[in-house]
Image (cartoon, rainbow, N blue to C red):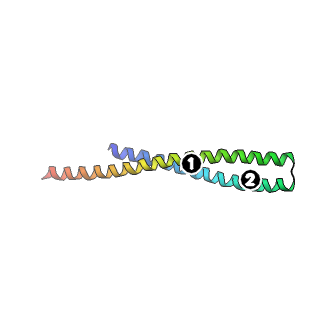
Amino acid sequence: SNAATAVTKKAAEAKKLTAEVKRHTKKKSTLTKRRKTATARLKKDASAANRKAVATVAKELKTATSAQTKARAGKAVVSTELAALKTAAKRLTAYTKVIAAADRV
């Protein structure tokens, strides 16, 4: 039915967004560790290369954070829609069963 198809499509979209959020979270944690080591290296030796490394990591981290925020927002919307669709699909299935039972009488 159309309801089942809609639920399946939304579930696939939710799964994709969950994976995307997970990927961004992992990248963000990696970059946070890299920033920590780059900052420590900069404190020991304030060379231009070390300053550039810290700046590059900060820029990448900012990008990763914004991407993660965007993906999380999308995931929240999709999961809300999916929950509503599942509820509607269950109600529709129950309603269809009642009608089928009434037709048999």
| Picture quadrant where residue 70 is located | top right
Residue type for callout 1 = Glu
Instruction: Determine whether the residue tagged by mark 2 lies in a helix, strand or loop.
Output: helix
Q: For the residues marked 2 and 1, what is the alpha-carbon distance in whole angstroms?
A: 22 Å
Q: Position of residue 27 (x, y in %)?
A: 65, 51
Instruction: Determine whether the residue tagged by mark 1 lies in a helix, strand or loop.
Output: helix
For the residue carrying disc 1, how many other residues have a C-alpha within 10 Å: few (<14), some (14-19), or many (20+)? some
User: Pointer 2 and pointer 1: residues touching (CB < 8 Å)?
Assistant: no
Q: How many labels does the image show?
A: 2
Q: Residue at x 37, y 44 (%)?
A: 5
For the residue carrying disc 2, how many other residues have a C-alpha within 10 Å: few (<14), some (14-19), or many (20+)? many
Residue 89 horizontal side relative to residue 66, left or right? left
For the N terminus, the quadrant is: top left
Q: Nearer the viewer, residue 100 or 74?
A: 74
| Picture quadrant where residue 2 is located | top left
Residue 60 horizontal side relative to residue 103, left or right? right
Q: Residue at x 41, y 49 (%)?
A: 82
Q: Which residue matches tag 2?
A: 35
Q: Earlier in the sequence, mark 2 or mark 1?
A: 1
Residue type for callout 2 = Arg
Q: Position of residue 77 (x, y in %)?
A: 47, 46
Q: Residue at x 60, y 45 (%)?
A: 67
Q: Position of residue 53 (x, y in %)?
A: 79, 47
The numbered disc on residue 92 is none
| Picture quadrant where residue 32 is located | bottom right
The numbered disc on residue 20 is 1
Which dot, 2 or 1, sits closer to the camera?
A: 2
Q: Which of 61 and 105 is in front in this view?
A: 61
Q: Which residue lies furthest to the left in this view?
A: 105
